[in-house]
């Protein structure tokens, strides 16, 4: 089967998807022309983010194609969530060693299940032979003035985080043979690693409430560093207040701290808000159905202080940033 | 050097680029946040296209990094040209085996030279370790109603092509050892292969004039096939009328026909327009400074007929489509 038939068979179902949408599509021209056309509502800016996932670097060869497709789209949607945008559409560029039906069928199923869950369309793409890699670009719309930025954190703001941290890293440590879990516990943390849920409803609800936001992809310490640099402030984090699953809470304390502080692959939102908006943050959390936890505060003094439950500083060698070229 | 420093050093110059632009930027938030924000003018749709280039498949390891970057961006801009859109911005996802200064410096220089030539900004991206591959997504704006589509060709329309065809394929045949050229002639066709010029001015000028358009990336026969399928028409092509360089015209006739009919990598525009608009097509060509050649016509009868200068049909085994999985 040739490239074009392959694309047609697995990915060309924009029209179907459009009919099942609740809201009218903003994709006015989909797959099959030189470009897709996407029309945001009047007064909205287009929010755009792109991520490339490479086998062996961003995912293990053991992952099921459905979950791989889900994650590739979900991590991009997480970037839209972090700026408070409503998702509209995405493009997919896919390189794979050969046109493999056994891979493409479940990959497309996982991709469209995630797309349908968020009411978005595949607007275009490119398929080619090459080492397995997936590049997705997502498009959302957001009112220009209320987009959540990394640069808005102010001294005195609370720091909040959504959901729970560290399970994805715990799963990776099990794969690496550095931790052991029972089968049921392992499936739970593996699900966190392979099926992250982008916090889109929370991101939208936080527009006008949060002063800054970022999604956690590289680990809390590293990602918070981007907020502090963009906002020219410092912060204090209460390491032991960071939310975690019962499975992770049952591990060695040093491993727990590594996972929640520098775990990576969490795809939760880390955001700041003035203390006067605590009730508004809780209301946004209820509206979105996503739990949030207050875990520190922004300081005028530069630098990051990480404290334990007793208020004692933790040494920085407990964690390290995740560097794609490390 | 870490990933973030690498990106910062080579790619973070959006602010500089913005100051040197003639028109106000539509990129209202650039590199450094979770998303970029792009605001098309009121009433405009966003045109979006994505392409992935893989070493050994889409480019040879012999290509200079400057030219590789130019081509990666230019082939995406060519998709915007084919729909008549004005380019605004692009994102870059780049995988490379290691953070290689000697590669990144000239790659970034080539990328920004092409971006500056078209007044567009790098709005965001992703850099990671992996086999060398480049995924670019481009963003343009176009009035929804006058975007050039593949589906608008009608029986009786003329078929036109811009520029010259086949030099890129001739260069590839030389690299493959199937053709030989003198040094100066080789440099000329190699330039066509490595430094295609997207026909953005012509695409814009053809809005409201052309009835359909596509850019030639896989070869005229294959790409015309997409237009015929989308428009549900047939066509007749005059193979010997297809424009070609003096270097290509000096080759064996069979090689010439292969190169112009099925060469690939031309990045010229193939478009249709009613005969009543011949003067308007020529005016658009002059406005854009891009030569155009009439090379056939659209038929009501399905199928593609390729004729020689004497009006005799050429056998289909003279060419073959370029399939990325063939």
Image: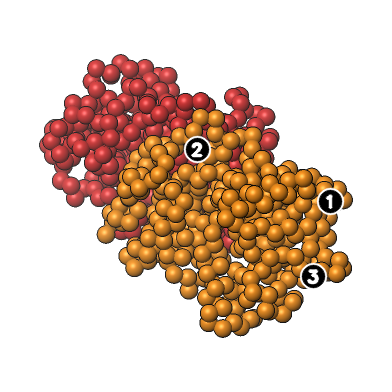
Chain colours: A red, B orange
Which residue is pictured at 64% across the width and 49% down the height?
A: B283
Image depth: mark 2 or mark 1 in front: 1
Instruction: Read off the residue under disc 2.
Output: A139
Q: Residue A178: image x %, image y %? A: 33, 53
Image depth: mark 1 or mark 3 in front: 1
Q: Which of the two residues, B40 or A14, is positioned nearer the viewer here?
A: B40
Which residue is pictured at 37% across the width and 60% down the height?
A: B109
Q: CA distance from mark 2 to mark 1?
A: 39 Å
Up the image or down, A230 lies above or below A290; here it is below
Which residue is pictured at 21% across the width and 48% down the height?
A: A318
Q: Residue A11: image x %, image y %? A: 64, 45
Confirm whether circles 2 and 1 share one chain: no
Instruction: Read off the residue under disc 3.
Output: B317
Quarter of the figure with the C terminus of chain A: bottom left
Which residue is pictured at 39% across the width and 36% down the height?
A: B28
Q: CA distance from mark 1 to mark 3?
A: 22 Å
Mark 1 and 3 residues: CB-CB less than 8 Å, in contact? no
> How many numbered dots are placed on residues in this image?
3
Q: Chain of mark 3?
A: B
Give the quarter of the image for residue A146: top left
């Amino acid at each position: 089967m040739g490239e074009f038939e392959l694309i047609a068979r697995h990915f060309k179902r924009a029209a179907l998807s459009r009919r099942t949408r609740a809201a009218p599509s903003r994709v006015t021209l989909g797959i099959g022309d030189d470009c897709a056309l996407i029309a945001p509502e009047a007064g909205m800016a287009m929010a755009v983010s792109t991520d490339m996932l490479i086998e062996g670097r961003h995912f293990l060869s053991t992952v099921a194609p459905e979950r791989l497709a889900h994650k590739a789209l979900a991590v991009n949607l997480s970037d839209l969530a972090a700026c408070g945008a409503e998702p509209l559409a995405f493009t997919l560029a896919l390189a794979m060693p050969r046109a493999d039906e056994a891979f493409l069928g479940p990959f497309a199923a996982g991709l469209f299940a995630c797309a349908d869950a968020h009411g978005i369309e595949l607007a275009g793409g490119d398929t080619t032979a090459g080492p397995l890699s997936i590049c997705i670009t997502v498009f959302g719309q957001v009112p220009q003035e209320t987009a959540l930025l990394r640069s808005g954190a102010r001294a005195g703001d609370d720091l909040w985080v959504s959901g729970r941290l560290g399970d994805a890293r715990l799963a990776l440590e099990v794969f690496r043979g550095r931790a052991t879990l029972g089968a049921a516990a392992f499936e739970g943390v593996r699900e966190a690693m392979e099926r992250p849920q982008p916090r889109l409803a929370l991101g939208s609800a936080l527009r006008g409430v949060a002063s800054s936001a970022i999604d956690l992809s590289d680990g809390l310490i590293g990602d918070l560093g981007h907020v502090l640099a963009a906002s020219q402030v410092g912060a204090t984090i209460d390491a032991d207040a960071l939310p975690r699953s019962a499975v992770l809470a049952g591990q060695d304390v040093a491993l727990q701290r590594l996972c929640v502080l520098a775990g990576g692959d969490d795809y939760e939102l880390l955001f700041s808000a003035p203390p006067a908006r605590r009730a508004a943050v809780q209301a946004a959390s209820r509206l979105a159905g996503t739990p949030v936890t207050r875990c520190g505060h922004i300081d005028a003094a530069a630098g990051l202080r990480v404290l334990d439950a007793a208020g004692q500083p933790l040494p920085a060698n407990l964690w390290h940033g995740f560097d794609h070229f490390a």
